[in-house]
Image (spheres, rainbow, N blue to C red):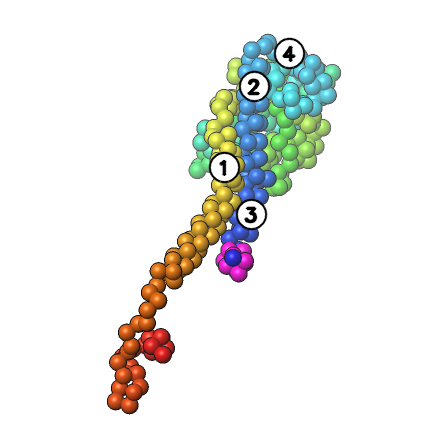
Amino acid sequence: MRKTFLTPGWAIAAILIALFSYFAFTFLAPWQLGKNERLVERNEHIVEAFDNDPVPYSAVAPDGEVAPADEWSRVTMTGRYVPEDEVLLRLRPVDKTPAFQVLTPFRIDNGPTMLVNRGWVPATDGGTTVPPIDPAPTSQVTITGLLRLDEGPHRLAPLLDQGHAMVYSISSAQASEITGADLAPSYLQLSPGESGVLEPIPLPMLETGNHLSYGLQWIAFGIMAPAGLIYFLWAEVRERRRFKQEQEELLVDAPTTASTPAPRGRYGHTKRNPWASAYDREQER
């Protein structure tokens, strides 16, 4: 049996199945289950935010830095927009429409300066040209929105295009890099109807998709793959035992009487069939 299964074919199959199961348990399943957990947590935060009245930003993020547990909190802040340091988020469609999202700093009274996502404008000329954008008010205003975590720097650097500073992610660090503004490491997603809002960014759908079922499927695949190998090994062993048993039964049932002698030639030699194979002639001898 060792000679049978210690062959390149069986060894390669065992290695590949072991690697597949390893990645299924350590990467693929946790990846999908982690996505589901994050979406469930996000949905809970959004529901909680709209079940309660908005609170002053200082009650959640006094220094402008939002903790992950406080993301999606609804807050109010009073201050002034800083339109001269406005940046655009490019290559981020909204509802499958090519768009530019408008990020305008907001200087909070007696507080930090925070980016405010005022909404989006549809791109023109095939999704490459910035259309006219309504400016943010310059007077003191009080606005309400959802606190959001900074997306972090994008691998592509900020750039100046069509007279606008542009970034590829909502990154306070990269917005500060291109504008020189001192920005808090979070941002506010402006709510509909607020001062300075454009087309508001829609809220995500409160659903988790199929990530949970995908995660469970990867766990099942990780179990089924080695189970399948074990089944084929067992089937191979069973087949070989059955074949061996049949051979033993044939030997037991074989007649013990001498078989009919083969016809001989003129000089007493066994007459052979000239068309017989070498194997058949060997058997005759």
Query: What residue does disc 3 label?
Result: 18
Which three-letter amino acid code belongs to the residue tagged 4? Val
Q: Position of residue 103 (x, y in %)?
A: 59, 27
**SS type, badge 1:** helix
- Which portion, as a residue range, is magenta? 2-11
Quarter location, residue 170? top right
Which three-letter amino acid code belongs to the residue tagged 2? Glu
Instruction: Determine if the magenta segment contains residue 4.
Output: yes
Which three-letter amino acid code belongs to the residue tagged 3? Ala
Compared across the picture, whether 43 is left or right of 275 comes to right
CA gap between label 4 and label 2 equals 18 Å
Q: Position of residue 73 (x, y in %)?
A: 61, 17
Nearer to me, 61 or 246: 246
Nearer to me, 97 or 138: 97
Instruction: Determine if the magenta segment contains residue 99.
Output: no
Compared across the picture, whether 148 is left or right of 3 comes to right
Between discs 1 and 3, the one toward the N terminus: 3
Compared across the picture, whether 160 is left or right of 210 comes to right
- Residue 212 seen in the current view: yes
Between discs 1 and 2, the one toward the N terminus: 2
**SS type, badge 4:** strand
Quarter of the picture holding the C terminus: bottom left
Does residue 125 sit above or below 3 in this rendering? above
CA gap between label 3 and label 2 equals 38 Å
Query: What residue does disc 2 label?
Result: 44
